[in-house]
């Protein structure tokens, strides 16, 4: 049987676009670089939000909401910060439109005295609140999170991966001591790692970014990096230890137990709708999207095979009873999400819609199933035997008894598949620059994995030289994994004694 | 015992500000007109969102996300729409900042060809998507909702009630026929009415707005109106039947069953963070906020009375067991929300924090409670006997057995109290203009309710004359209640034969 998509993963960029479109996840909008997130795509985001929000709250953080607009003077307070973001900021300059010479335009009389920036991130506006809220060590730690939209002007947009506007959460915390703030930074990185692996079924490697890749204004930046099916790395989440940089720029101080005034140590950390792009590129196949059950808006979709015949009524009735029984179950500590698809289109078209969208279990009920108390279903994670679609028939009672186990198996199976790909494609035996060049030689289209190599952790100009060499091969340093060995090979760039292992990859 | 607030409700505007501050709900921000929503305030919004989202989905709507920015040319497409919003729109004109002459400013070389408006509402950008998504009658009805931030420039901001940026949901739907679209408009108005009354415990009157108060571009606008404790009306939600106005402006067409091309009929409807202002002004008292349990972020707060003594351990242990037992219960079909307040401040201070914030049940546990298996608590809805705070002691087992019933009682009691105020303060015996003038004569500070009067439903200039008369008394027409009698008195403005009853009130 023909694949649902006309493109296979060997033309990866085209395949990605096709999956986003065919799975009805999102589309481009008339506003360059901004996307429309469609119901199925937004449904995935709602599951990500709900799941991650529980974990963020369970680690003691509270949600707030801060203004969308940031006064220009606030952004300018931290020098590296403004330098990092100035080139991609949307600027509000007027607060009224007026018809002038028959043309609607910004009213010159409503020009703002100070322009407002649409938040690219909220360190400065939240830091301002922190400076008012924090007085004493008793106010610390202050642990805040916000779910919001942010804007970073994007010249080469790609749906979910790089968009001018995106949705995210940004955590912001203040602490009395450096050690606590570093601990928080690492704790939230671990929350991201666990969420990515346990919920998105997307294995990642957590580590520290090189100094050139730090968040503008940060002392240290940590990331989780995932491997997409074309071998490229996707930075899926970051956590920043900001030291006292923002506290000094914004006067975030507290009175310590002995009465002295000290600057707070702050952190920030975020993940965004980019995660959805990661899920697509991790789990999609030649038939479209495959969603891990933990984030599928519908985990089981029931398609009644109606044919405008008298037996339709019995089929529909049977489906309703089945759906009601499924809706009473729980999976991953939440109610099982089931849909009875009664849309007035052909059932074959419905089936393929759900295949492309990646619903984990697709049940098709015909008159024979209804009369025999059977359930016939497809597993989206294991759809085909060669070209043939696999259809599994089970007595209704067995299906209901086993469906939770089945969803858990699908979740684990998708993770295991991605984990094997990650583990199998990190080369650890490259010891010199010739080896690097050799591995990444050849066509850009060819699958290339990552290298895990030793280096001597250069800084300043020496680091820039390393990055220029890598850039010529379209490579970047992803991170230095947290999990480091006790001894190192020679630096792959210079031959000097190595002091750290890093991951090198092509990246999104 | 002294009140928690130093202000009583007879100085209502000051009292409102004091409650917002003392209940730690929100504060003004450095961006004029935009607020910071603090954790307790945002927690209320999260409950409102979750509860309303369930109802919006239960009526068949799906969530999406559309761009924050709207091209100027889109806004200009519907003439009344642009006229209605032009004066309050934030306009993005540049996409980069640059250091010029030592000053950070919008980069003249990064001026946008077409300015972008920050959405004040999304009819035009969503209508554009609808024009692409809708092809056939089989695509209809299209039922979409979005949770988002919007910006309407505000010259006289007030926290929650009128802010330059606010959070809301906006529903947008397209239908094949006029009747279905009108039905949808009314259905969502009813969803708002029921939500407001059942969940916010805020009684409202649903009705149709006069033509001058319609949403810019709408054929009909309906509202729910709530009475605040100063007698003023608060428009708490609106639902608009847009006819084919936006469909014609944006070419939203469908092929009907006979193959002809027709314009869709569209609707939109929204409620916002303004609801939180309504809750405060409906339920607050001289001790601060009182929250209906259905939206209280914490329904039961347990305050251990710790005194740095050995018995603290037993008190804390007892509290933990109590909280664990409470967390296993459900109320209003959701897990009961309980907090053990272990903050390191004095327990008396904690108690008053929770009183001001309006936690429905505040439990204080001392060593004697712990050793006698007792629970001593306060009901926030019925806090005092004269000046004295009422403290109720019950065996632990009885408290646990009755707590769900108690929360339901508090919810109903707050509604009943507000309902009695609304019903008792709508005057229905005013039959002429002198009567209107007479009722609203006197000091602005004095409590005045609403009038329900007959009128002859004038339009155009005659309606404007009526509104000018009302405006001189600081009055407005709120709506024509859906529930109309079969015969009418004379028009209160002209003495002509009445054709409709309307509500007249001062308003926010």
Image: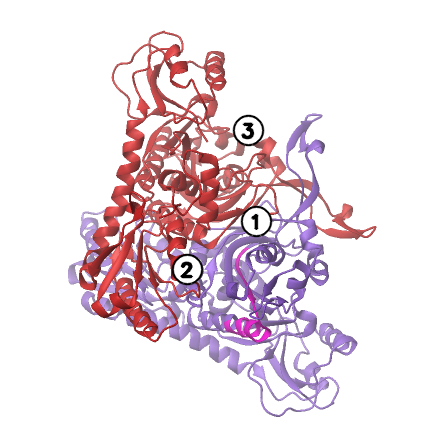
Chain colours: A purple, B red
10 Å crowding of disc 1: few (<14), some (14-19), many (20+): many
Give the x, y percent position of residue B37: 50, 50
Is A213 above or below relative to B448? below
User: SS for tag 3?
Assistant: helix
Residue named by callout 2: A50
**Which residue shows up at 49% across the image and 19% down it?**
B471
Are both tags, 3 and 2, on one chain?
Answer: no
Are both tags, 2 and 1, on one chain?
Answer: yes
Magenta includes A173? Answer: yes
Report in which chain the residue with disc 1 lies. Answer: A
In this rendering, the label closer to the viewer, 2 or 1: 1
Q: Which of marks 2 and 1 is nearer the N terminus?
A: 2
10 Å crowding of disc 3: few (<14), some (14-19), many (20+): few
Is A298 left or right of A304, judged from the image as shown? right
Are both tags, 3 and 1, on one chain?
Answer: no
Is A302 above or below relative to B436? below
Looking at the rendering, the stretch of residues picked out in magenta corresponds to A167-187
Numbered circle sitting on residue A67: 1
């Amino acid at each position: 049987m023909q694949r649902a998509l006309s493109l296979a993963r060997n033309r990866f960029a085209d395949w990605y676009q096709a999956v986003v479109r065919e799975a009805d996840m999102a589309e481009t909008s008339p506003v360059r670089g901004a996307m429309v997130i469609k119901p199925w795509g937004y449904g995935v985001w709602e599951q990500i939000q709900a799941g991650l929000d529980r974990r963020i709250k369970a680690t003691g953080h509270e949600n707030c909401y801060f203004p969308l607009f940031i006064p220009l003077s606030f952004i300018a307070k931290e020098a590296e910060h403004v330098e990092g973001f100035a080139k991609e900021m949307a600027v509000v300059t007027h607060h009224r439109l007026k018809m002038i010479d028959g043309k609607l335009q910004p009213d010159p009389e409503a020009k703002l005295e100070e322009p407002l920036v649409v938040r690219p991130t909220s360190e400065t506006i939240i830091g301002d609140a922190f400076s008012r809220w924090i007085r004493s060590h008793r106010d610390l730690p202050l642990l805040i999170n916000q779910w919001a939209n942010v804007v970073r002007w994007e010249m080469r947009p790609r749906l979910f991966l790089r968009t001018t506007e995106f949705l995210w959460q940004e955590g912001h915390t203040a602490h009395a001591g450096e050690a606590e703030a570093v601990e928080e930074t690492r704790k939230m990185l671990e929350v991201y790692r666990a969420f990515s692996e346990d919920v998105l079924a997307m294995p990642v490697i957590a580590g520290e970014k090189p100094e050139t890749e730090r968040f503008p204004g940060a002392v240290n930046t940590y990331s989780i990096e995932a491997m997409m099916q074309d071998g490229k790395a996707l930075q899926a989440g970051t956590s920043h230890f900001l030291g006292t940089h923002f506290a000094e720029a914004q006067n975030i101080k507290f009175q310590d137990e002995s009465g002295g005034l000290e600057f707070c140590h702050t952190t920030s950390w975020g993940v965004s709708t980019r995660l959805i792009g990661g899920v697509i590129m991790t789990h999609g196949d030649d038939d479209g999207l495959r969603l891990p059950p933990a984030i599928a808006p519908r985990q089981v979709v029931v398609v009644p095979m109606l044919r405008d015949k008298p037996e339709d009524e019995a089929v529909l009735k049977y489906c309703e009873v089945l759906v009601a029984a499924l809706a009473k179950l729980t999976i991953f500590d939440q109610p099982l999400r089931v849909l009875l698809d009664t849309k007035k289109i052909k059932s074959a078209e419905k089936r393929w819609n759900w295949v492309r969208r990646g619903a984990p279990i697709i049940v098709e009920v015909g008159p024979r199933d209804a009369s025999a108390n059977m359930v016939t279903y497809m597993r989206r994670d294991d759809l085909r035997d060669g070209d043939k679609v696999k259809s599994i028939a089970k007595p209704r009672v067995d299906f209901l008894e086993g469906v939770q186990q089945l969803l858990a198996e699908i979740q684990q199976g998708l993770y295991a598949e991605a984990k094997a790909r990650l583990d199998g494609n990190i080369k650890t035996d490259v010891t010199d620059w010739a080896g690097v060049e050799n591995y990444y030689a050849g066509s850009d289209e060819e699958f290339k994995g990552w290298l895990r190599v030793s280096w001597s952790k250069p800084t300043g100009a020496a680091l820039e030289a390393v990055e220029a060499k890598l850039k010529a091969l379209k490579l970047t340093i992803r991170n230095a994994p947290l999990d480091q060995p006790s001894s190192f090979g020679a630096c792959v760039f210079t031959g000097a004694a190595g002091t750290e292992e890093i991951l090198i990859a092509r990246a999104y």
